[in-house]
Structures are given as C-alpha cells and as structure tokens.
Amino acid sequence: MNVDALPFTILILLAECAIGGLWVLVASDARGMVAKSFVKFGAGLTLVMAAFTFWVAAKVQVSADVDGYPLDPAYMSGVRIALGVFFALTFPYLYLARRESRRAGLIRPEAAR
C-alpha cells in the first residue's frame, strides 16, 4: 500500500463508522430496548465522528492518479457536500435525543399505521 492512499483509506473508514454508527443507533432506538443514556451518548459520538469525517474530507486533496489507480477529482465535491449534509443532520438528531423526544427523533413503523 502506498502512503498516498492513506488519506482516502482513513476517509472511507471514518465515513463507514459515522454513517453506519448512526444507522445502528437508529435501529437500536427503534426497537426501544436500549437505555436513553445509550441513545444520547451514541448521538453525541455520531456528531463527533461526522465532524471529524467532514473535516478529513475537506482536507483531502484528490489527484488524477494515486499509486497507479485513476481517480476522478470531480466526485470529491459531491462527497464533501454529502458528508456536510450528514454532519448538519446529526445536530437535530442529537438535540432530539437529548430532549428524549423519541417521536420527533424517530419515525416508528407502528405510528405510521
């Protein structure tokens, strides 16, 4: 592995942890079998991970070639926007989790029937 690929590897791992962590947290909260403190802590941790992921995405410089693999630098602007939107959406989730507002923070399947 080339050292030039390390920032991209870190970005992928951070994005997986932040986005996947939120999905697991929402799924756990939807089941209603976790403590409120777990949801609050997880929402705060997701916000921190999303912020760190967005920061790394903003700092990564994309060239046309990394270790012989061609890259398209045009895709990085879309990735940055998507990660910025994800980061922005973690704020309301954290706010609603701290207020213990499960109905507003989570759409329950049985409530939609």
Image (cartoon, rainbow, N blue to C red):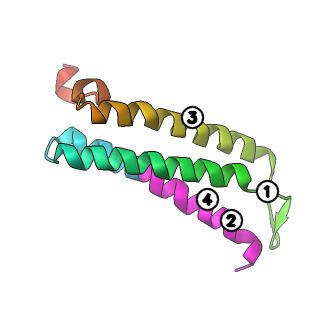
Disc nearer the start of the sequence (1/4): 4
Give the amino acid type for the residue marked by disc 2 in the picture.
Pro
Position of the C terminus, as image quadrant, is: top left
Give the amino acid type for the residue marked by disc 3 in the picture.
Val
Specify the label residue 85 is tagged with: 3
Position of the N terminus, as image quadrant, is: bottom right
Does the residue at mark 2 contact the one at mark 1 (Cβ under 8 Å)? yes
- Residue 7 painted magenta: yes
Does the residue at mark 2 contact the one at mark 4 (Cβ under 8 Å)? yes
Give coordinates of residue 100: x percent, y percent.
Answer: 22, 32
Residue underneath mark 2: 7
Give left or right: position of 44 versus 101.
right
The stretch in magenta equals 1-20
Disc nearer the start of the sequence (4/3): 4
Residue underneath mark 4: 11
Location of residue 5 with respect to 50 vertically, above or below = below
Disc nearer the start of the sequence (2/1): 2
Location of residue 40 with respect to 101 vertically, above or below = below
Disc nearer the start of the sequence (2/3): 2
Residue beneath the point at 38% across and 46% down: 44
How far is mark 1 from mark 4, CA to CA?
12 Å
Specify the label residue 61 is tagged with: 1
